[in-house]
Image: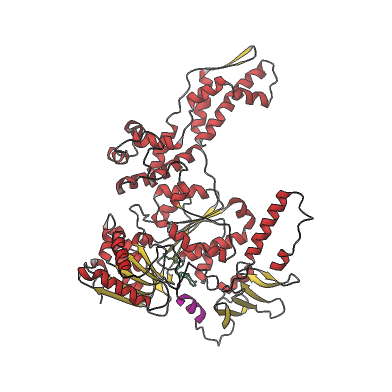
Amino acid sequence: MREDVESLDITDVTGNWVTAKILTAEFENRIKALADLVHTPLFFGRLDYREHEAGHRFYIGRRHVHDAHGDPMVIDWRAPVSQPFYRASRTNPMDVALRRRFGYTGGELTAYEDEHLTDPTEADTGSALLQAEIERPRVGPMRDIVATIQPEQDEIVRAGIGGTVCVQGGPGTGKTAVGLHRVAYLLYAHRDRLARTGTLIIGPNRSFLHYIEQVLPALGELNVAQATVDDLVAQPHLPVRGTDTPAAARIKGDARMAQVLRRAVRSGIRIPTEPVVVVRGSRRWRIPAYEVEELVRELTGRDIRYGAAREALPQRIAHAVLVRMEQSGEAPDDRVQDAVARNTAVKAAVKAAWPPVDPAKTVLRLLADPEFLAASAEGILTEDEQKEILWAKPARGLASARWSAADTVLIDEAADLVQRTHSLGHVVLDEAQDLSPMQYRAVGRRCSTGSATILGDLAQGTTPWATATWAEALAHLGKPGSAVEELTRGFRVPREVIAYASRLLPVIAPGLAEATSVRESAGSLTVRSVQPGELADAVLAACRDALTQEGSIGLIAADARIPALAEALGAAAVPYLSPGEETTPDIRLTLVPATLAKGLEYDYVVLDEPAAVVDGEPDERTGLRRLYVALTRAVSGLAVVHAAPLPEQLGARS
Ligand SMILES: Nc1ncnc2c1ncn2[C@@H]1O[C@H](COP(=O)(O)OP(=O)(O)OP(=O)(O)O)[C@@H](O)[C@H]1O
């Protein structure tokens, strides 16, 4: 297939150099997509449908492959014929007589496993290849799970594009993996539509995005944008240089701010009291004040963007002029209406009634001018709340203001009040529990005419404004009442470790079910108590111990402890990486600040001083949730080393 593309000669068909460039680029992309990847086999499964005739046997793989005659050899995993590979069971064989899974070692076919779904005498033993895949040591960035997607995951992956799906799932239940495969599926099933409208994956931070960035290209999808929420609302010339107190950030992130902003943006609207007089040639056309007033009142009552109304008003006034021209026997056309709309008298009337609004300046004024804030927030924010968000030292101009991350979300909201934000076809929002209501709104307007996949775990919410329920989050996103699915089978964390971490659940997320572990090996869990002076040495020893095993090692610690640990590692000449940097055979240890651990995983985790992780957060619940995240990053083993007493919720180990 690659040679076919490479041998295409386009000199005859390209009329001009633009077409030639575009075609060449497309061919290059296709050749790239058809590259041989040594460790990525062409197929991983086979389905024999029950009528066992020619054409009833299908090989399933990452992409479609055909032979020299164009006959299919491997079917794309996303095609409808492939679906039973993931969903068929003994209770519902879906017409499949045989399902075969192929196992590979370093790109070599080394095993296969058969299930005769309609044979009642065959025992249901579960898949050893799935187990092997789950147990495989983790090195490098996240990989795809296309060969082993589980039925409950597949339901979410293939859910229709029309609806928004929200997935609540404990640590390691495959939310991120499912979200990425869902994008690949949607791009396959709705390629044209999504090529036009675009898809976007939103993750919590850069290192997380780096960790997941290889998955879609491995599935043949090269054109999916990735961003953090901060990237989405970033203002080109207004860098974030300030921080908010947790209290201020909370108020700025509250959905009530949307009402405050709406009032602020519209605060300049004035009901006209003067007539508009348009002079054209030797004639004067006068629209009396009451009529202009009516036009303005009508626009204020309509649910259209501020900017759209501002564009509509001069046209309406011009129309009123045109009506008068017609009444006096003239026959003006559309060009006359446009010319009247641009007339200086009309422009001045519009400016007075509906002045232009700069979103950033509006937010600046709200945060700097107590009277403007009071007028906009009256009956919405209390006086104390207003005081909390006002800048102690009011900024003078846009460039000198110390904008915080929450402020940029406010500017984004104000901008949307003025002009509708462009909506994409599909948005995947990962680690969604952490967003503030205003951030949900920012994401929601980017999929207002599309759909979304919302992934998260309420127990891992580590912002003071983390959502309490998915219903609330979905309402802020503008997708109220969307389906909420739950994933509970964990593919990462070993049994003993998830049981230990789950001791925190009653405090951090009462009512949430404990994740189970599908891993067969129980995993190793050690908790070591040492004297304060010995902490760094004990942590180093635990890292060295972990390094004797295969796979990646994450040393997770409270952010405040990172410099001390970095120094200790340096002094002991133990090389280490930062999150987002790729492990190599020589450097497999990553030093991870607890605040960046979310979404990542390591074969072995050494957790330094849990009490410090809890103390690093503004309140205890958030601290314990941060600890829960840190405790659930391990694939094979977790070693906890502490000098301070463990948080009591973790309890003494029985
Ligand atoms: N069906 C599967 N087959 C093989 N591996 C899987 C499967 N589902 C998930 N995994 C693996 O389990 C690990 C955890 O998955 P993932 O990171 O998607 O979980 P998550 O729910 O997003 O976790 P967290 O809440 O901690 O962010 C990953 O290594 C992923 O590849």
Report the quarter where the C terminus lies: bottom left
- Residue 613 lies, in percent from the top left, at 29, 62
Report the quarter where the N terminus lies: bottom right
The secondary structure that dominates the magenta segment is loop
- Residue 52 lies, in percent from the top left, at 69, 81
Asked whether 136 falls inside the magenta stretch, the response is yes
Residue closest to the far right: 12
Asked whether 207 falls inside the magenta stretch, the response is no
User: Which of the two residues, 567 or 272, is positioned nearer the viewer here?
Assistant: 567
Q: Tell me if 160 is positioned left or right of 546 in this view.
A: right
Give the magenta range: 124-145
- Residue 115 lies, in percent from the top left, at 57, 82
Q: Name above or below for residue 555 compared with residue 206.
A: below
- Residue 48 lies, in percent from the top left, at 64, 79
Q: Name above or below for residue 642 compared with residue 319.
A: below
Q: Residue at x 44, y 63 (%)?
A: 581
- Residue 336 in view in this figure: yes
Q: Residue at x 45, y 28 (%)?
A: 269
User: Which of the two residues, 440 or 88, is positioned nearer the viewer here?
Assistant: 440
User: Which of the two residues, 70 or 290, is positioned nearer the viewer here?
Assistant: 70
Q: Residue at x 71, y 76 (%)?
A: 55
